[in-house]
Amino acid sequence: KIVASLSHLWMILHIGLRGILLMILASARFTSSFVVQCRTHFRPGIRLYSSSTCVKGAASSSVEISIEDAKLLHGKEGVTFLDGSWWLPTSGKNGRNIFEEGPRIAGARFFDIDDIATKDKNLPHMMPPAKLFNAAMDALNITNDHNLIVYGQPGCPLAYRTWYQIWAMGHDLENVSVLHGSVQEWANAGGPTDAEPMKETFLADDLDLTKTTKYTSKTRSVVGLCEMKQIIASNEKDNLIVDVRSAERFFGKVEEPRPGLRLGHMPGAKNFPFADVLDPANIVKLKSKIDLVTVFDRAGLDWRNENCRIVASCGSGASACVLAAALIKCGRDPSTVAIYDGSWVEWGGEPDTPITTD
């Protein structure tokens, strides 16, 4: 009996130890697989993971990608770099011309927000009709599964409009990001560049909008004039309008860069200059998340309340996208952020829209 009992006990221990060993091996295989997945970053058809902030089962919603990480992805299948630079007309600079003159990131394309746009309202870079956007993405050889890295030229903080437009037209947010640094910083870090002059291959007027496209789009998180009028007339608390122009423009103390516009701001809007979210040492970049949170809190911006949608407005719909990027970088749900596409160039150009300087 004693021998039988010892034999039975040994069998139980053997089975138990074997089970524990199998569990340890399975855990090791899962950990290894997960780390590899986290380091994959951009790959066609899968979501973006950040190696610095891996969370089991969760995809990263980071707006930016570092130059070093972007260099690892350069030249990979399904990854496209886009120069999204845009300059105010008063700057005397033209993003397309600078891109074509070079240098540019090797293999990059130029995304022209003034050309891939709705033009029948005589307003600059309005969100394009779906047919035009789809045809443009096809012309750029971009599919819905492509991973896109948008970058800007030195001193240009407005490539975020290109980033926002691509997302607002339906591209997966986890498959489009902004390079954390300009093309010059890319070159300084050893990233490959093209220096020879070139011509971007198409203009919107050259595209055949009757053809069936591979790319399919869906518009989201963009507010038009009629909806803005309704928001202001209702005076409800489920929308917060944030005007990112300078305080002088917000309060109507200086003339607008575009002549003929009325001065002031929309009733109920809160002023938060977009320059406050940019790195003062390099305005191509957003501030760190910690610094952004501090800036938002000091300004009294109720950015954590996701029951209230934040609608960003600016001069023409470009710098509003910088605020949207900063909010999403801080973890705000992208579905609770929108931009007023026409912004002040539309609102201030209308004869009867309500305006205040208080």
Image (spheres, grey):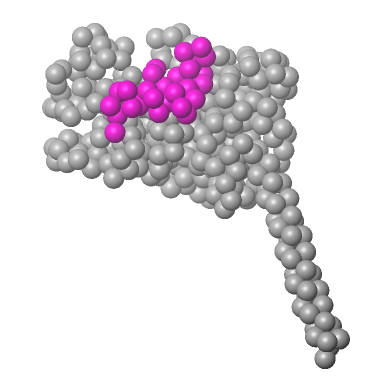
- In this view, the residue farthest toward the front is 2
- In this view, the residue farthest toward the right is 3
User: For the point 45% across and 8% down, which residue is it?
Assistant: 92
Q: Is residue 143 magenta?
A: no
295 or 11: which is nearer to us? 11
Q: Is residue 296 magenta?
A: yes
- Left-right relation of 321 to 215: left
Q: Is residue 340 visible?
A: no
Q: Is residue 154 visible?
A: yes
Residue 263 lies, in percent from the top left, at 20, 16
Total numbered labels: 0
Indicate whether 151 appears above or below 29. Answer: above
- Left-right relation of 166 to 146: left
246 or 19: which is nearer to us? 19
Residue 51 lies, in percent from the top left, at 64, 39
Asked where in the image residue 222 lies, by quadrant, the reply is top left
User: For the point 29% across and 45% down, which residue is it?
Assistant: 307
The quadrant the N terminus occupies is bottom right
304 or 62: which is nearer to us? 304
User: For the point 52% across and 26% down, which residue is it?
Assistant: 84
Residue 197 lies, in percent from the top left, at 67, 16
Boundaries of the magenta span:
275-302
237 or 44: which is nearer to us? 237
The quadrant the C terminus occupies is top left
User: For the point 32% across and 23% down, which residue is it?
Assistant: 298
Indicate whether 170 appears above or below 229. Answer: below
Residue 332 lies, in percent from the top left, at 40, 39
